[in-house]
Amino acid sequence: MKDFLATTPAELRLTVALDLVQTCDYAPLALKALRFLRHHAIAYDNIEAKVKLYTLYTTNENEKSGSSSSSSRGVVQANACEADLWTYSLYDKSITDALYACNDILTTDDRPVTEMIGDNNNPQQKKKPDIAYLAGLLTTRGVGCKQDVQRGMILLQRAAQLGHAKAAYELGKLWDDGYSYSQRDRSKAIPWYKRAIELGDKRAHVDLANDCYAAREPARAREHAIQGAQWLNNRFCQYLLGVLAFSSSLSMSNTTTMAEALKWLTAAAQQDFALAIEETARLYFKIQKDYAQAYRWCSTSKAGDIPFCQTVLGDLYRNGWAVSRDYNKAFTHYQHAASHPESPNHYAQHMIGEMYLQGQGVTQDIKSAKSWFEQAASQGYEPSRQKLYDIVHNPPVTTPTPQKKSYRWSALSLFGRRK
């Protein structure tokens, strides 16, 4: 394959190959060009080659309208299933990896990949775990074929029984995911995850850590989380280890486990894991009272979308903790948290009301204060309910706004003054 189009400039070879497939009357040469494109798409994950294969198999406008003037293009017929496969291969890494594992087979057979994979009589489905895995992956997801989860799982099970680690892991994911498979059953997922680990796919540690934690089995959750953190540097596992260590520190008042909690949470936060950033900030702000560290974590770019972190910044600026007191900045951060589109923070809403009530960073406005207290109270925030009660029964004293002295007639008085 490397000698094909050897005299053609490297940057033009894929374009020339596409042209040969579409226009060459000599079938052996056209098929060789097709294998060349397929080899570059699969073996080298070449985006240009994938796009050209998509172009080859995409139904053109004349074919859509039923015109007989373009019933064929060289050795390739329009094929929506094949076009679908190459589209998915552009961004789905699991499909890309599965195709790569089958490169030797897929680049020596001139049939469309989806036709080879979808052939139930293909003996390689029963003998080659990589082919069975690819077929199962495409069938369960409906890529390049009609979706059939049951048949896809049979193919994946066949691959797993032949020793394919990724197939075992995929079976675990399917049994564990109610969105992909309506018959979700975690008890059936766990054996497949364990089998995947035995076969060498350590990703299953992450899923087992999550499942064990959800099942309130902290010891087993920690066991798998350690593996996921150490082998995969997985940020969820790091976060989970931090949460488990923090829980232990509370129950045992152990400073060592608190240090371990901060170590793991920090590791996950450094990978921009939002939950870890929030918990790290919470530990420093509420437990350690280390306001400088709280400010550091709440000032990261990812923290800009975390309501709790914005409330911390609001508190720091309002009280002058680790930063210079700045009511305007405090008000801005409270606003960000209070108006978060997915989870508006009731504490931030309360604090905006407080700042309007006190005239901190804004003009004192009792009506606006009540409005913000009402928003927080409607979410069950008790301090806001108490504030509303106090406003009604003990009306706050309104601080008069200082009036600036007018100098409108100063020029006239200067020049019109009698001596």
Image (spheres, grey):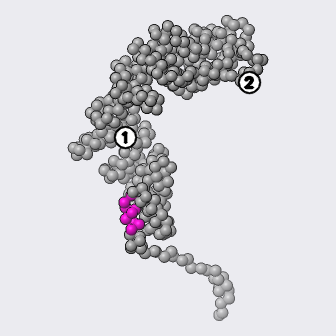
Q: Is residue 319 placed above or below 285 in the rendered structure?
A: below
How many discs mark residues in the rendered view?
Answer: 2
Q: Quadrant of the N terminus?
A: top right
Q: Amino acid at mark 1?
A: Thr
Residue 301 position in % (x across, y down): 48, 45
Q: Secondary structure at mark 2?
A: loop
Corner quadrant of residue 54: top right
Q: Is residue 275 magenta?
A: no
Measure the alpha-carbon separation of dots 1 and 2. 59 Å
Residue 402 position in % (x across, y down): 51, 76
For disc 2, the marked residue is 65
Mark 1, Cα crowd under 10 Å, few <14 / some 14-19 / many 20+, is: many
Q: Which residues, given as a range, are shown in magenta?
A: 381-389
Q: Is residue 53 placed above or below 322 in the rendered structure?
A: above
Question: What residue lies at 46% left-to-right and 10% top-to-bottom?
Answer: 126
Residue found farthest to the left: 252
Q: Amino acid at mark 2?
A: Ser
Q: Is residue 54 placed above or below 381 in the rendered structure?
A: above
Residue 411 position in % (x across, y down): 66, 82
Residue 327 visible, this orientation: no
Residue 51 position in % (x across, y down): 63, 23
Residue found farthest to the right: 69
Corner quadrant of residue 249: top left
Q: Quadrant of the C terminus?
A: bottom right
Question: What residue lies at 39% left-to-right and 58% top-to-bottom?
Answer: 381
Could you say which disc has been placed on residue 266 in the image? 1
Question: What residue lies at 50% left-to-right and 49% top-to-bottom?
Answer: 341
